[in-house]
Image (cartoon, rainbow, N blue to C red):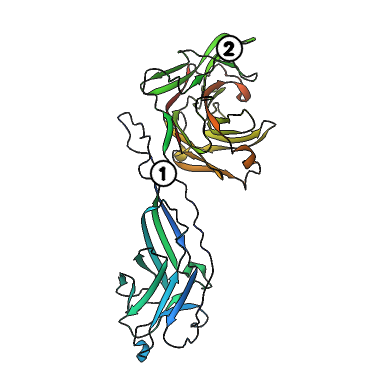
Amino acid sequence: MRKRTIALIATVLAAVALIPVLAGDERGKPDPQPSNGREVQVTLSPVADTTISQVVQDGDLSAKTTLATCPTSCENNTAGRRDAQLRFSVTTLPASATDVHATLRVYSWQDYPARVSVGDAQLPAVRTGFNEFPVSLGNGTFTLSQEGYDQRIYWASEENADPALRPQLVVSYRQAGWKLVWGDEFDGGTLDRSKWNLRNGEGRDIDLGCNVDSPANTFVSGGMLTLRALRQSVACGSRTRQFTQSYLDTMGRASWQYGRFEIRAKSPTTATGSTGLWPAFWLRPDDGGNGEIDVTELPGGGAWYDKATASIFWDYTPVKQDVRIPLPGGALASDGFHTYATEWTADSLKWYIDDQLVWTRDRTTTPWFDQAFHKPYNIRLNTQVGGWLGTPDAATVFPADFVVDYVRVYQ
């Protein structure tokens, strides 16, 4: 055996902290605070390994590139003890990691009647395949020692030609979750105007509906916010529109640069009877400039109702990226309450539906990521009628209610 020092740096990928759905209150509303984060598991490769020996090294077992162990009286040589030492980089684990557990996995090509230990962990016999030792991380250095069998045991090393056989350190830990920094549970009897602006008497040129500040279109009841679209003719700015709709935002009241933006809602966009309806939960920059993050859009109509849309915009020429996403398990946005969330960091955007990751954008996928997504954004929440989806037809059902259980922001 030759003494070797290997320099393969192990990289631990940062894990996404998912927000767990908890038991919640008597209405089934999920608890607004994550409990104690999420369980993360990473597998590390050694940065170095060697056989520590009191005898002259004598090859690598037919070029398998191995580590060796043997007791003090190794093969009747009283000076022949061999231990295998492996070193891992554990400094890359998050400083906030708690409840850390680690397992050292080392591969043997055959069974042996030997006791092998790593620290306080001991196996009564060696088995073909990976042998596992629960260990404490310490400084990431582990020594494999052998007793009760006076012949060398060979183990696959970090240099083994087959990467699947190389030693592994499997580390699991709990990573701190997001902290709730803003939210509305809609538990009062009226809309909290300290948190929300309610737009009135306006509509975009492409819209068929008029945004109105009316209790007929926006109301809180039973712990829910309802944004209602109605088929009714109203004067709206310089024109008459045939529908009214609800549009809320937090401009001038609350904005955030990075965070998890989450809504739990039920959409009116059924398979039939929803053509021209367009509920949405989205973000726009405070400065009014370029950029948009659509956490979810839930357009109606036969070609749209069965998927959620996630989008990002740089400008409206359009420079954008979007995706239409089926809900997990074949669910529909109209069949009950579903959770839609976007986790926005300095390096990426990740979309979740019912806590399942469904889409990711970063600098690799989006060359204009840094230009668009490094400034404060505010929340927009609305039910739009018409626009690029077209005009509601005779089958479109009104009132059309976008019902929101909560809106939450975590950082």
Picture disc at residue 242: 2
Q: Nearer the viewer, residue 321 or 19?
A: 19
Residue that badge 1 annotates: 177
Tell me which residue sits at (41%, 65%) in the image: 139
Residue 95 coordinates in the image, percent (x, y) = 43, 53
Q: Nearer the viewer, residue 362 or 63?
A: 362
- Does the image show residue 309? yes
Residue 235, quarter of picture = top right
Of marks 2 and 1, which one's residue comes earlier in the chain?
A: 1
* Dot in front, 2 or 1: 1
Side of 125 relative to 384 (left or right): left
Which amino acid type is marked by label 1?
Gly
**Disc 2 crowd, CA 10 A, few/some/many (<14, 14-19, 20+):** some
Residue 189, quarter of picture = top left
Per the model, the C-alpha gap separating discs 2 and 1 is 46 Å
Residue 98 coordinates in the image, percent (x, y) = 37, 52
